[in-house]
Image (cartoon, coloured by chain):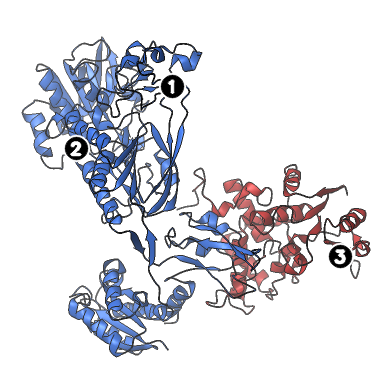
Amino acid sequence: MARIGVFVCHCGENISATVDCENVSERAAKLPGVVYSTDYKYMCSDPGQSKIKEAIIEHKLTGVVVSACSPRMHEPTFRKACAEAGLNPYLCEMANIREQCSWVHEKSETTTNKAFDLVRMLVEKVKNNHPLESIKVPVNKTAVVVGGGVAGIQTSLDIANAGHKVILVEREPSIGGHMSQLSETFPTLDCSQCILTPRMVEVAQHPNITLYTYSELEHTDGFIGNFNVRIRRKARSINEKLCTGCGLCCTKCPAKKIESEFEQGLAYRTAIYVPFPQAVPNKPVIDRVNCRYFQTGKCKVCQKLCPTGAVDFEQKDEIIEVKAGAIVLATGFEVKNTDFFPEYGFGKYKDVINGLQFERLASASGPTQGEIRRPSDGKIPEKIVFVACAGSRDVAKGIPYCSKICCMYTAKHAMLYKHKVHEGTPYVFYMDIRAAGKNYDEFTRRAIEEDGAKYIRGRVANIYEKNGKLIVKGADTLMNGRPVEIDADMVVLATAAVSCEGSESLAQKLHVSYDSYKFFAEAHPKLKPVETNTAGIYLAGACQAPKDIPESVAAASGAAAKVICLFAGSELTREPIVAKVNRMPPPIFSTCMGCGMCKEVCPYQAIDKEEIKNRNGETIKTIAKINPGLCQGCGICVSFCKSKSIDLEGYSNKQVYEEVLALLNS
Amino acid sequence: MIETAKKLLKNGDVNIVIGYSEGSQGRVRPFFARNEEEAENLVYDNRCTQNLAMYVSKKEISKYGKPAIVANIHTLRGIIRLAVENQIKDGDLIALHINDKDEMTVCSTLEEIETHLATVTPQISDEDKVMIEKLDAMSLTERRNFWEKEMENCIKCYACRQACPLCYCTQCTVEVNQPQWIPVEASIDGNLEWHIMRAMHLSGRCISCGQCGDACPVGIPIHLLPMKLSQEVKNIYGSISGMNRSEGCAMATYQPGDKENFIG
C-alpha cells in the first residue's frame, strides 16, 4: 500500500496570501494513501527539509508530494532531501501551487480548491512512481568549436587553457572572422586587429588546440559527452607542412582581378592567395574556380615558383572523423549586402556601401591604407551620409529585429571619418540611438557633441545620383517631418545583421533549433543563454542573435565555462527521464513490432534496432531500442507508438493518466 | 495461376500459396494451398477483392515457411508498406500479381513489385470518391452527426482491424488496460474513440484498399476515414504510402520543405 506524505509550503506569503494552505493540508490528509500531511512557512528552508526527512523515516513514506513552487525551482532540493532520508529521489513529486495557482488567482475558496486539486493529481501520480536510478554517461574531453571568429577563438582558448583538447573548425582559409576586418572598435577606438591578432596567434600556437581552417563540419551523430564529428578539410591545393608562407606564389599569379572577400570587393586578390597579411595560418589557398590551371589546364606558375614544392594541384578534400564530448557553435553573422535596398541604389551606385566596406576603407591595412576615399573615383568625400537601421527594425523588409551593433558602429564611422577628414561633414539618419552598454552612450554623445556628426532623426526615402552627387532624400521627424535633402559624396548603409549562410542546414545537421531568422535558439532566453536544446551543444557569439564584440566574447567564455563544467568529471550523471521499450517474458519478448517509426520520429537519433536472439544466435524478433544517453525524454516516440510499447520513465502513460483522472473525478 | 502455384510448391520455392477458393453461397474465401493437390482449388475472378496481404504477417501462416501470395494492386501496396515498416524482408515472399486484364506476373523481389507499382496510379473507387466529396461538403456539426449516427451501430467486433494488412501489432491500443485508453464496451463515445484512434494510426500509412469498410458486418463506411487522411497526406506532403520502400512515413519525418500552414 502506498504511504504518501504531503507537504504544503506557504512560500512566505507567496502562496498563503491567496491559498488557505492549512486547509489544503488538512484535506490532503484524508486522501486515500496519504498517511501524513503538513504545512510550513518555507519548505525549502533547512527546517522545512528536515520536516520531510523526519516524516519519511517516522511514517515510512513510499512517496512524497511537495506542493510549493515550480519544479524548475526546487525539485532538485526536495529530491535530494528525500534521498538523504533514504527515499528514492524519483518518488518525490512537486505540485506547483505557486506559479500555477497562488500567483495567478485572487484569494478565494476556489483558489484553495484548485491548489487542493493540483495536490490530489500529484498524489495519484506519485502512487504510480517507481524508483529510478540516474544514468551515467562517459565523457570524451575534447571540444569541437565551429567558427573561428572572435567568439570561436575565445571559447577555444578558454577551454584549451583549462587543459582540454579543442578542435577549431573554420570555413574560411584563415581564422579571425569579421573582427579581423574591422578598423577600430567602439567605444574605445582601439585597433581591432591589434587586439585580435595576438589571440589568433595564441590559437595557432596552443598545444591543446588543433586548427582546421578551410574546413567544414559535415556530419555529427552521438550525444553529450560522446559526439562523432565528421569534418571535411577542403583541398587547399597547398601542402601546409612544406609551405613556409613566403608569399612568392601570390605575387606572380596571373589571375589578379578577383574581388577580395576580405576587402569586401573593394580590392582585388589573386587566385592563389592569403586572405590578409595577419592570416592564421599564414598559408595560401588556391581558389579553384578562378585558378587558370584548374580552368584551362595550363599555368602552374605558382608551382614552378614555389621554393619548397608545396603547391599540390592534385590535393583532394580530406575527411576527418573526430570524437568529442561537446560542440560549441560560433558561426557568427553576416551583413545584408545584396540587392536588398533598390531604393538606396545599393549595387547600382558604387559609392553606396555598407558598414563593413566602410570598415575596410577606414582600416590602415585596407585598400586605401586607411584614407577615406570613395570607391568610384578615389576622391576624398566632403559629405558622407550614414543610414542606420538599413533593413533592421523594418517589418516590410522582413527584419523586425534590431541589429544592435549599428547605432554604435555608425557613431564610430562618423567619428573615424571626422578624425581623418577634418573638413568633412558626417550626417547620420537614425530611428533611435540605442547605446546601452558600458561607455556606449558617452561614445555616441562624443560623436555628436565633440566630433560634430549631424544626427537627423528620420528615415531615408530614396537615394539617386545627380551631377556626380548622391542625393539623399529623407525626413526629419523631430522637425515635424520636414523634408531633408543632402547632396552627399558617399553613403554608408548600416545594413541589417543576419544569420550566416548555411546556418539552417548546420542547425538541422546538429538538431539544434533556430528562430525564424535562422539564428540558433538558446535553451532558455534567461537561464540557459549559451546552451541549446540539445545537450552538449553550446552557442557562442552572433550565431545566436546580433551581438557586439564584448557580448560575443562574454558568451564565448560562458559557453567555454559550460564545456569545462561538463569535462570536470569523467562521467556525467543524467536524469533517468528517458523513454523505454517494454520487455516481456517469452514468447512475446516485447509488444514492440519493430516498425521503426519511432526511429524516424525521434529528433535526437536516440532509437535504433535491437535484435532479440535465441541460444543459437538466430534472430527471433527485432524491436526498437532507445539509447538512454541520447534520449532527451521528449516523449514523441511514446505518442507515436501504435502498440503503446514505449513509455517515458517518470512520466509513464499510467502516471499521467492517473493524474488526469484524479482531476476529472473531482 | 494454378500451374504456377503448383510449380512453385513442387520446386520448393514456396511452402504455401495464399489465394482464393470457392466458398459457400457463391462467394470466394481465402485459401491456403500447402501442396500441389490443394493448389487445384485456387480460383481467381472479379469476386476476389480481399487484400490477402494481411495474412503475410500472421504467425499461423508464417509458420509454414515462405509464401506465394495471389495479389491485386492493393495487395502489392500492402506488401511494400509492410516492408517499409520492417514486417517483411526482401525474399520473404513471392507475389503472383494478376492485373485487370487477367494477366499474371510473378514478382519474386520487392524491387519487381516496386517497378510494377511505379507504372500505376493509385485510384479509389468512384463510389468512395462521391462519399468523400459528400462528407467534405458537410459542416463540422453535420459531419459529426453523420459519424455519430454510423458509429451507433458499431459492435466493436474489430473486424476492421483484422482485415487491415497494416494492423499487425500483437498488442493493439484497445487492448492496453494500464491505463485503459479506450473503453471496452460498445458505447457511442468509446466507438468514436476507437475509430478515431484507428484512423490516426493509419494516417500516412493507409494504402486505401478499403478492406476495413468491406469487412464491417454492420456496413459502416469506416474505410473513408483513413482514406481521406491518405488524401490529405498526399496533398500536404506529396507522399503516397505503399508504393516504394524509400517512402518512409510522412507523419514521422520532417523535411525542411514541409508545409506548416496547418499550424495556427
Residue A136 position within the rendered picture, expressed as x and y whole percent measured from the top left = 38, 64
Name the residue at 41% across, 50% down.
Answer: A227
Image quadrant in which the N terminus of chain A is located: bottom left
Marks 2 and 3 share the same chain: no
Q: Amino acid at mark 1?
A: Asp
Q: From the viewer's perspective, is the residue at label 2 or at label 3 nearer?
A: 3
Alpha carbon separation for disc pair 2 and 3 = 85 Å
Return the residue found at the far left. A450
| Residue indicated by mark 1 | A312
Residue A556 position within the rendered picture, expressed as x and y whole percent measured from the top left = 25, 45
Q: Amino acid at mark 2?
A: Asp
Identify the element where label 2 is drawn. Answer: loop
Which color is chain B depicted in? red
Chain of the residue displaying label 3 = B
Closer to the chain start, of discs 1 and 2, is 1
Which color is chain A depicted in? blue
Q: Amino acid at mark 3?
A: Arg
Labelled disc at residue A432: 2
Residue A586 position within the rendered picture, expressed as x and y whole percent measured from the top left = 62, 74
Q: Nearer the viewer, residue A496 or A590?
A: A590
Identify the element where label 3 is drawn. Answer: loop
Residue A453 position within the rendered picture, expressed as x and y whole percent measured from the top left = 12, 26
